[in-house]
Image: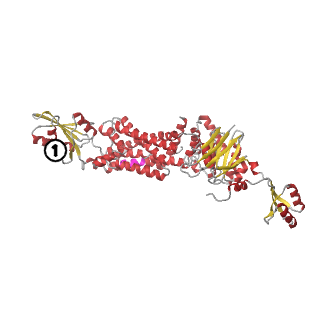
């Protein structure tokens, strides 16, 4: 334990004196948060270019459901296969797979009831538009005098605003950039013979890597706290919308911690793999930018075409963003994104350890 | 008592065509400074790395009896940390803490004479001070076996003299100091035993006095004035006398005192002479040949 504490102290001291590394970790994401939140604030208010999936559920009458869906489709609404039952329909909406599900129930065809299960991410304008389409179809079919509307999920939620998209997005981006200071110090340690000296003192490779995990984990959490604070306090002072924090801050901390585990695993892997700072910049820096580009950090996923949205699922940054949005917008479970991040972090750390041992460290 | 034993140590780097070390056997016991000499690429640093546990995969046996401290050729510390922070880190990693850590930091800082710069960042120190910090870190645990890999590279003459004095003072019956260097005069000045390594093989090992002992009867002389021509002609045929024309002579005799008496009787004053002893550089060059290695 004494040895581990010595490593953590050394890492903190080295980090605190790495001005460029700290600028990358704190100033860069903060600048992105402010600039992008302000620059894209109007874009996020519009529903332009969005195609929303919907389904029609008519228990016992799939033919009628298909007929209604055919009439509702178009003008930004895309018909999807109907879920098996109302419970599954609610789950699909809650997960954001479908924007709306029209449930046709009651005494059909004498006195039917029509209910729209709606994703809180839909804007009010989209909801009204969908209601009107349902009304017109219903009147055309002469079956329903009124349409009930039920928003499923957190009523405070909705499609992310500019600040709700950009704060977690650039925070995640900044957290993954711990790869750069991690690599910088590790490469200096290898080049200057410090790792060799530590090996001669019988310091195991696991200790070398564990010595980096603690300080960078705390650093990541510090980044999360400061970037969220920038969204809450700084962005509104500059004319943007304030970030509203969710009631469950513990879940926010859990997503931040899971993101940190993945980011540190990535950092350790690149630090051990790269032999020079140039290699680290290419693998770590460019890797981060690509993961951000496809993962909905630079461009929100909901404006991407379906193929790109599928590709985004491969990016750990997208998993992290899903986790943050699950807490901040949807009020849904964070288990899956957190599990993916933790497994990735563990796998990358194990790979780094294997590689370091193989190199005789 | 510290002991270091290498038995039949061989090593080839992964993917390398030739073995870097071939059947190296050395027995070091009883303390003192042991010099490990060899031209560039001879395998000295590889051997040190194997003994220090940095390199794995060597065949043969390495047995260390006693704690080991390594002072590598590189300045293996953190330039962004102060000297004290570096010493605290390396001490902490090796299990030192509290009062014992402070005590050892004071001891090694005093030994390396870096007390006045303990609060300065290591990266800002002069070359000599960096070398001294490098040495101090290697001595933190008061090791019984100290491996010094070219510890005087790139330092000024004053720092070199200080480092050599310090290294000499480290050695004792309870401590083995293994010292690698290119500088023959350093090795000759501080080592009791030496081994000469080339192409991964030990060419010669033993006590320095045995290695330098010359039984060929070579006498080197510097005289003023020059030898009378008659005597010189006689000695050319009897003792294979050679001269450089500037008062320096080489000849082979059985009785050095008789030769010196004859010189004095001829009216010449011996300004300097050497008999029965070789220079380490002569031995080294004779064994390793003169061809360039880099």
| Residue B19 inside the magenta-drawn segment | no
Q: Is residue B41 left or right of residue A97?
A: right
Name of the residue lying farthest toward the top = A107
Q: Position of residue A204 (x, y in %)?
A: 54, 39
Q: Is residue A207 left or right of residue B182?
A: left
Q: Position of residue B59 (x, y in %)?
A: 60, 43
Q: Residues within 10 Å of mark 1 (few under 14, many from 20)?
A: some
Q: Position of residue A11 (x, y in %)?
A: 51, 42
Q: Is residue B63 left or right of residue A139?
A: right
Q: Position of residue B269 (x, y in %)?
A: 86, 60
Residue placed at 47% from the left, 40% from the top? A213
Q: Is residue A198 left or right of residue B218?
A: left
The main secondary structure of the magenta stretch is helix
Judge by depth and name the residue closer to the eye, B131 or A341: A341
Q: Is residue B236 visible?
A: yes
Judge by depth and name the residue closer to the eye, A336 or B207: B207
Q: Is residue A232 visible?
A: no
Q: Mark 1 — residue?
A: A70
Is B230 situated above or below A6?
Answer: below
Is A106 situated above or below A158?
Answer: above
Residue placed at 41% from the left, 45% from the top? A176
- Colour theme: secondary structure
Label 1: chain letter: A
- The quarter holding residue B176 reads top right
> How many marks do you count on the picture?
1
Judge by depth and name the residue closer to the eye, B136 or A190: A190
- Magenta segment range? A26-34
């Amino acid at each position: 334990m004494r040895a581990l504490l010595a490593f953590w102290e050394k890492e903190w001291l080295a980090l605190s004196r790495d001005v460029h590394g700290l600028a990358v970790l704190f100033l860069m994401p903060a600048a992105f948060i402010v600039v992008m939140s302000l620059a894209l604030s109007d874009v996020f208010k519009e529903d332009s270019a969005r195609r929303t999936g919907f389904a029609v559920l008519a228990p016992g009458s799939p033919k009628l459901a298909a007929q209604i869906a055919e009439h509702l489709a178009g003008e930004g609404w895309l018909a999807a296969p109907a879920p098996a039952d109302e419970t599954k329909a609610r789950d699909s909406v809650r997960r954001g797979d479908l924007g709306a599900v029209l449930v046709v129930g009651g005494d059909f065809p004498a006195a039917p009831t029509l209910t729209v299960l709606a994703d809180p991410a839909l804007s009010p304008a989209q909801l009204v538009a969908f209601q009107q389409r349902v009304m017109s179809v219903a009147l055309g079919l002469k079956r329903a005098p009124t349409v009930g509307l039920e928003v499923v999920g957190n009523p405070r939620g909705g499609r992310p605003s500019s600040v709700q998209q950009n704060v977690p997005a650039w925070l995640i981006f900044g957290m993954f950039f711990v790869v750069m200071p991690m690599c910088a110090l590790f490469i200096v340690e290898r080049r200057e013979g410090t790792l060799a000296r530590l090996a001669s003192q019988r310091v195991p490779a696991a200790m070398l890597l564990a010595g980096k995990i603690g300080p960078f984990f705390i650093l990541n959490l510090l980044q999360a706290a400061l970037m969220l604070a920038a969204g809450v306090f700084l962005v509104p002072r500059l004319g943007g919308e304030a970030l509203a924090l969710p009631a469950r801050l513990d879940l926010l901390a859990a997503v931040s911690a899971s993101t940190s585990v993945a980011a540190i695993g990535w950092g350790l892997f690149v630090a051990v793999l790269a032999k020079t700072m140039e290699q680290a910049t290419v693998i770590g820096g460019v890797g981060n930018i690509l993961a951000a580009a496809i993962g909905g950090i630079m461009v929100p996923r909901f404006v991407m075409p379906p193929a790109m949205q599928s590709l985004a699922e491969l990016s750990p940054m997208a998993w992290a963003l899903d986790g943050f949005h699950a807490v901040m917008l949807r009020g849904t479970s964070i288990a899956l994104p957190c599990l993916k991040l933790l497994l990735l972090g563990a796998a990358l750390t194990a790979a780094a350890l294997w590689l370091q041992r193989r190199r005789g460290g | 008592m510290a002991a270091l034993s290498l038995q039949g140590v061989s090593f080839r780097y992964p993917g390398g065509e030739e073995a870097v070390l071939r059947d190296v056997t050395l027995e070091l016991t009883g303390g003192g400074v042991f010099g490990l000499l060899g031209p560039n690429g001879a395998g000295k640093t590889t051997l040190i790395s194997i003994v220090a546990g940095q390199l794995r995969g060597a065949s043969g046996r390495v047995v260390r009896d006693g704690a080991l401290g390594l002072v590598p050729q590189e300045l293996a510390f953190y330039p962004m940390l102060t000297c004290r922070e570096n010493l605290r880190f390396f001490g902490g990693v090796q299990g030192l803490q509290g009062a014992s850590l402070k005590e050892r930091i004071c001891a090694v800082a005093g030994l390396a004479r870096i007390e006045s710069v303990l609060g300065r960042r290591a990266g800002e120190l002069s070359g000599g001070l960096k070398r001294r910090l490098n040495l101090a870190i290697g001595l933190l645990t008061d090791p019984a076996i100290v491996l010094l890999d070219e510890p005087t590279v790139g330092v000024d003459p004053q720092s070199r003299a200080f480092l050599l004095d310090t290294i000499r003072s480290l050695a004792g019956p309870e401590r083995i100091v293994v010292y690698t260097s290119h500088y023959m005069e350093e090795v000759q000045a501080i080592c009791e035993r030496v081994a000469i390594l080339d192409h991964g093989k030990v060419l010669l090992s033993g006590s320095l006095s045995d290695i330098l002992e010359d039984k060929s009867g070579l006498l080197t002389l510097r005289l003023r004035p020059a030898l009378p021509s008659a005597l010189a002609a006689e000695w050319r045929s009897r003792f294979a006398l050679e001269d450089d024309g500037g008062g320096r002579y080489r000849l082979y005799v059985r009785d050095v005192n008789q030769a010196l008496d004859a010189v004095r009787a001829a009216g010449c004053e011996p300004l300097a002479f050497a008999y029965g002893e070789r220079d380490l550089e002569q031995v080294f060059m004779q064994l390793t040949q003169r061809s360039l290695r880099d």
